[in-house]
Image (tube, helix red, strand yellow):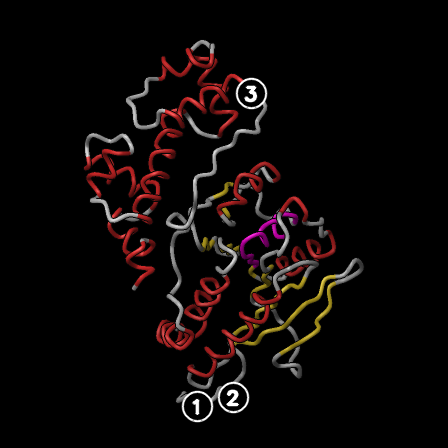
Amino acid sequence: MTTRSKPNGAPVAEIGLLIYPDCQLSAIYGMTDLFRIAGEWADRRAIRVSHWQASDEAVTCTWDSHPDLPHRLSHAIAPPSLVMPERMQPFPVAAAWLRGQHAEGTVLGSVCAGAFVLAETGLMNGRRATTHWAFAEQFARRFPDIDVADDRMVLDDGDIVTAGGILAWTDLGLTLVERFLGPATMLATARFLLIDPPRSSQRPFAAFIPRFDHGDEAIRRAQHHFHAHFTEALQQADLHAVAGLTERTFLRRFTAATGHRPNAYIQQVRIAKARESLERTLDPVDRIAWDVGYSDPAAFRKIFQKLVGTAPATYRKRFGIAAADG
């Protein structure tokens, strides 16, 4: 490997990585390596990395790339969890440590379910944050004062920065490399690691997962009707008749049970089917649009772009069988 001269000046920043029970250690070590590699490509500059272990009593430093210097964290980051959010323990000691760091001017960050740890600080109330798209609904229920932007891959809110997917530590890491070492070093690091530069959206990866366990039998009947007849021109009057409810009551209960208004729900169902066809077949896009219930291909493309964040042809190129074969 040919690199620039190794960094030997004072670190331009110190990034503290929080180790809590059941966190993803590969993210801890992966970010550590990413920042070290970035330093190899920088001109006499380095990012200092320290590891901080959370216990029931305290948070202590267990590893430091520059152990002879006093600590001054620019960022403190909670990595992803390896367990699902409902099994994550409360972390009051870690939350208190994060609050203390924030009070001293440290920017707080999280990746994926690490947002649940960060949210315990209370510092994100009234703010926007992102987490893994599959955890967004549970995150919103547990922390209703936080505005969940689950379509974002990295959301930088100044003193708090959150990243979405479980491997979004690469996006967050490269974002910080660009901030401290510049875009040229960020791109050199990404090229060396064979990873994409920071991505902006989770939407191409997110799947529509309908809820049927909400306990509202009337709404469940309407959902089943949706899924059985999604290619048809469904009218809301037909649906509240299936549910046996008045239109106003149906709309209120459907939205409360599913998290979507009826028209938005049917769009999600149709676009999910379209994504499956784009991934698994070579059928023309216009044919797929017709098969999932859109008589106007232009309207289909517009809705697909809105919900998925990319055009159908681009989505197929990235996720389709031809891409996999190539």
Residues packed near mark 3 inside 10 Å, few (<14), some (14 to 19) or many (20 plus): some
- Amino acid residing under circle 1: Ser
x%, y% of residue 191? 37, 74
* Mark closer to the observer (2, 1): 1
Q: Earlier in the sequence, mark 1 or mark 3?
A: 1
Residue at 47%, 38% (x, y): give it: 209
Quarter of the figure with residue 283: top left
Residues packed near mark 1 inside 10 Å, few (<14), some (14 to 19) or many (20 plus): few
Q: Earlier in the sequence, mark 2 or mark 3?
A: 2
- Reading the image, the residue beneath label 1 is 5
Q: CA distance from mark 2 to mark 1?
A: 9 Å
What is the quadrant of the C terminus in the image? bottom left
Disc 2 vs disc 1: Cβ atoms closer than 8 Å? yes
* Mark closer to the observer (2, 3): 3
Secondary structure type for disc 2? loop
- Reading the image, the residue beneath label 3 is 216
Q: CA distance from mark 2 to mark 3?
A: 64 Å
x%, y% of residue 254? 47, 22
- Reading the image, the residue beneath label 2 is 8
Residues packed near mark 2 inside 10 Å, few (<14), some (14 to 19) or many (20 plus): few
- Residue situated in front as seen by the camera: 318 or 52: 318
Residue at 48%, 34% (x, y): give it: 210
Secondary structure type for disc 1? loop
Q: Residue furthest right?
A: 57
* Image: magenta residue range: 108-120
Residue at 68%, 67% (x, y): give it: 52
- Amino acid residing under circle 2: Asn
